[in-house]
């Protein structure tokens, strides 16, 4: 019940195309859903995040779509660029004790955008 | 200025040795974390400290011991290193909120 399932494992998209990565969860106590972008040799960087009280959040070319009833959320990258080539992780978080938040990460999606 | 920094970036050592990884954050955050990323890129939380107090302690061997001398620092000491400990270890920090900020990672190789 603590798992976050992410798909696809890898994705190849043409420049200018739309990249879509999906995640699903079981634990209804999760209340925060961030996406992280990781380049080789670097730490994960927060890209965009959503709370379950909204169905969509957009920041530039990145959009999160959230379906609470289906317990699914997805990341859409519009007009994908070669510079977007990285590994993307979804995560789900629930409050732990003392105000800390425990992230459960998906297994990652390696995105390659062809020039 | 680097927000979350880790030293060393690379660590190569032999089985049975003891090693430490240091983490510092200059964001004024209250909470710090250690994560392990394995060879398949899977990220898993190990520990969390809030105001120098251990809050989250996942199922991690006792050979791993975190220490937080102050709010800005969280170190990870590993005793009797094993081959399976080879991974990238990330430190992260957060104000008492959801957003976590990760350091650049320490690649540990045990031979």
Image (cartoon, coloured by chain):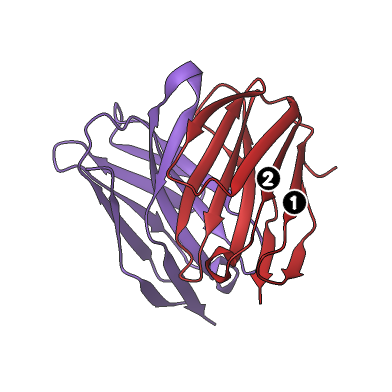
Chain colours: A purple, B red
Numbered disc 2: secondary structure: strand
Residue A61: percent from left, percent from top: 48, 53
Numbered disc 1: secondary structure: strand
Image quadrant of residue B94? Answer: top right
Residue A93: percent from left, percent from top: 39, 35
Using the image as rendered, state which of residue B69 and residue B106 is in the foreground: B69
Residue at 33% in and 39% down: A56
Q: Is residue A14 left or right of residue B73?
A: left
Q: Which chain letter matches label 1?
A: B
Label 2 neighbourhood size at 10 Å, few (<14), some (14-19), many (20+)?
some
Q: Which chain letter matches label 2?
A: B
Judging by the rendered image, the residue that carries numbered circle 1 is: B20
Whether residue A15 is visible here, answered yes or no, is no
Same chain check for tags 1 and 2: yes
Distance CA(mark 1)–CA(mark 2): 6 Å
Q: Quadrant of the C terminus of chain B?
A: bottom right
| Earlier-in-chain disc, 1 versus 2 | 1
* Cβ atoms under marks 1 and 2 closer than 8 Å: yes
In the rendered view, tell whether residue B64 sits above or below residue A85. above
Judging by the rendered image, the residue that carries numbered circle 2 is: B76
Residue at 75% in and 65% down: B11
Using the image as rendered, state which of residue A82 and residue B28 is in the foreground: B28
Residue at 56% in and 21% down: B96
């Amino acid at each position: 019940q603590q798992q976050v399932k992410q798909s696809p494992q890898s994705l190849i998209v043409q420049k200018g195309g739309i990249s879509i990565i999906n995640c699903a969860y079981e634990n209804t106590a999760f209340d925060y859903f961030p996406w992280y972008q990781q380049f080789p040799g670097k730490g994960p960087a927060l890209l965009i995040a959503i709370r379950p009280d909204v169905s969509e959040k957009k920041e530039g070319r990145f959009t999160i779509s959230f379906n609470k009833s289906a317990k699914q959320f997805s990341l859409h990258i519009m007009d994908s660029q070669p510079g977007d080539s990285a590994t993307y992780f979804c995560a789900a978080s629930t409050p732990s004790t003392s105000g800390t938040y425990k992230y459960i990460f998906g297994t990652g999606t390696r995105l390659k955008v062809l020039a | 200025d680097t927000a979350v920094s880790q030293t060393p970036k690379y660590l190569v050592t032999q089985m049975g040795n003891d090693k430490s990884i240091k983490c510092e954050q200059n964001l004024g955050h209250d909470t710090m974390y250690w994560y392990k990323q394995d060879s398949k890129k899977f990220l898993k939380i190990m520990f969390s400290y809030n105001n120098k107090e251990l809050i989250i302690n996942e199922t991690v061997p006792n050979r791993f011991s975190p220490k937080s001398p102050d709010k800005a620092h969280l170190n990870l000491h590993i005793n009797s290193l094993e081959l399976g400990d080879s991974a990238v270890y990330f430190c992260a920090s957060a104000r008492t909120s959801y957003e976590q900020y990760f350091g650049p990672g320490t690649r540990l190789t045990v031979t």
